[in-house]
Amino acid sequence: FRAGGIRLRDDEVAAVGDVRGRTLLHLQCHFGIDTLSWARLGARVTGADFSPAAIRLAQELATDLGFDDARFVESNVYDLPDQLDGVFDVVYTSRGVLGWLPDIRGWARVVAHFVAPGGTFYITEVHPIAQVFENEGVGAGELRLAYPYWEHHDPLVFDVKGSYADPDADVGAQKEHG
């Protein structure tokens, strides 16, 4: 990515179309690589995420790569209308975000709040059934339901050991909340 590539899938770019000069809000942007990919394609981007560490990293990456116009907002997605003004030509969200939401209707209201008249909302997501099965400690062909299919108000809580980037990383005694 640092060498100039983008992290978006070809079908996403084709579906959203030319973003040069358009405003784009990326909800639940994590540390901003997809957001900055849209910037690399010419969009004026704003990313939003509830993680202060992710937003800090996104801002540092934007600065390091010269995306001085990229904005990143730390906010719970449901509180974002109180934290961010304006509407956007494109509101975008990427894979792996819906299963963590306790209130899908409230989330949809946030999306609708930010889409400009005539604008586009684009979501790419895995079907939620793919997220309900336990994937650790199961045998070949064994399916074990472990996670909710529908929205859920209580957060999912996991003991953290390492990370997806480094399974042996020292992450301390923190918990990860969905």
Image (cartoon, rainbow, N blue to C red):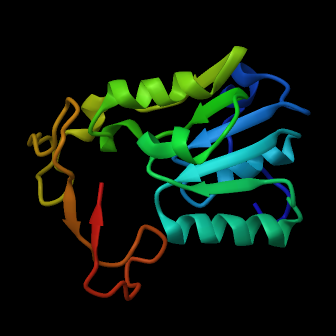
Rendered position, 149 above or below 61: above
Rendered position, 165 above or below 34: below
* Closest to the observer, 16 or 1: 16
Q: Is residue 25 left or right of residue 138?
A: right
Q: Is residue 52 left or right of residue 78?
A: right
Residue 150, horizontal then vertical, whole percent = 20, 29
Residue 72, horizontal then vertical, whole percent = 67, 56
* Closest to the observer, 31 or 168: 31
Q: In this view, does 38 lie to the left or right of 142?
A: right
The residue located at (70%, 66%) in the rendering is 59
The residue located at (47%, 63%) in the rendering is 51
Q: Image quadrant for the C terminus?
A: bottom left
Q: How many marks?
A: 0
Residue 159 falls in image quadrant: bottom left
Does any portion of residue 170 appear in the rendered image?
yes
The residue located at (66%, 64%) in the rendering is 58
Residue 112, horizontal then vertical, whole percent = 54, 21
